Image (cartoon, rainbow, N blue to C red):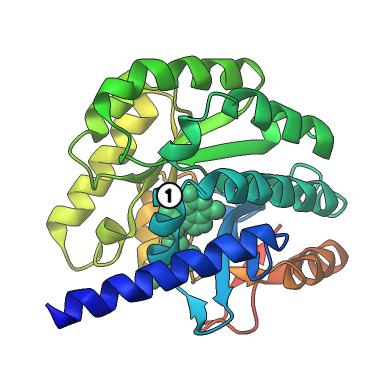
Amino acid sequence: SADDYEKNLNRIDLQEELRESVRNGFAGFHLCYQLQVSGTDYHVRGAEALLRYESPSRGRISPEEFIPLLEQTELIDPVGDWVLATALHQCKCWRKWVPDFHISVNISYIQLRNEMITQKVLDALKKAELSGESLTLEVTESMQLQEYQYFNQIFYSWRRCGIQIAIDDFGTGYSNMLMLKSLPARELKIDRIFIKDINENNKNSKIVSTIIDIAHSMNLRVVAKGIETPEQERLLTQMGCGVLQGFLYAHPLPTQQIPTLLQRDSLTRQLNVVSCLPQQRSVTL
Ligand code: C2E
Ligand code: MG
């Protein structure tokens, strides 16, 4: 149809722009960071690095749109390397204010298929002068089941160096339980879809509390993402959720806005996390 044709043309144009950006030293790409806080005392634990792309012709493009294109074209390999190096560098810088600042980076299963990936991650850590414990790599359930064995070799090599694996979007894919059983994961991230109406929907709150119990029995850390209200926070902390992430604490922010927050905190021991939040939230470090 004319509509499909138009969409395809748009996609091809965007792919070309992405390719050009990579050639031009990743022009148009930048990272935002979303703070994560401890569910017990609201310490800032670290941040998740989130990739952004500004197209020269149509402005800001959603990651939901450009990341699949990066994956299809395998541009995700160089871009993923750049994301990791940039995020680790920032993590190292921010340790000046929060000595055990921790960085989480999303990694696509396409990147995992690159035979150099194990070493590339270790080299990036070395270059940033950080130990493996400072890094969590978030993988999603889009991995293919038959590939678990191959991926596990990579994950175990990383685990030996302290790098942690998180299962992202937990609960949304049919293979999640198998992932839980098969992967040497250290963290489980509960998808926003369950958090969104956790206070109104009894089924969701039961699912979340069961996920948290299963995770704890397997010695996994639980991160709830997409927390937007104090009511959601109250329920999640009651359920024993270890780490909290969402607009309630901080939106994903550009690099330059993070140090001000961390510095301010180190001066006052109180962090009004983000002044641009819809609801202001006070978090103690
Ligand atoms: P994700 O890993 O699940 O990241 C969390 C997403 O939830 C982010 O969307 C974030 O902006 C959004 N979010 C966080 N808190 C809230 C909240 O309280 N309410 C709502 N409504 N949303 C919240 P974003 O930045 O659009 O990223 C979308 C996805 O793109 C990410 O989901 C991740 O899967 C992927 N992505 C982002 N950066 C990278 C990257 O560097 N590499 C790869 N492979 N994927 C990435
Ligand atoms: Mg993630």
Side of 199 relative to 101 (left or right): left
Percent x, y of residue 217: 35, 24
Q: Position of residue 75 (x, y in %)?
A: 53, 50
Drawn side of residue 9 relative to residue 279, left or right: left
Above or below residue 56? Residue 66 is above
Query: Relative to residue 61, is residue 199 drawn left or right?
Result: left
Q: Helix, strand or loop at disc 1? A: helix
Left or right: 265 in relation to 180: right
Pick the residue in front: 1 or 271.
1
Residue 230 visible? The answer is: no
Across and down, in percent, residue 16 comes to 50, 66
Q: Which residue in the protein does label 1 denote?
A: 71
Residue 271 picture quarter: bottom right
Nearer the observer, 180 or 30: 30
Tell me if the residue at label 1 has its CB under 8 Å from ligand 1. yes
Residue 166, percent across and down? 46, 37
Question: Residue drawn at (66%, 23%), measured in percent from left and top?
Answer: 119
Q: Going 42% across and 37% down the picture, which residue do you hit?
A: 109
Number of numbered discs visible in the structure rendering: 1
In the rendered image, which quarter is residue 253 located in? bottom right
Q: Amino acid at mark 1?
A: Glu
Q: Is residue 232 visible?
A: yes
Position of the N terminus, as image quadrant, is bottom left
Residue found 41% across the figure and 44% down from its top: 240
For image coordinates 45% across by 30% down, the residue present is: 113
- Neighbours of disc 1 within 10 Å: few (<14), some (14-19), many (20+): some
Nearer to us in this view, 96 or 183: 183
Q: Quadrant of the C terminus?
A: bottom right
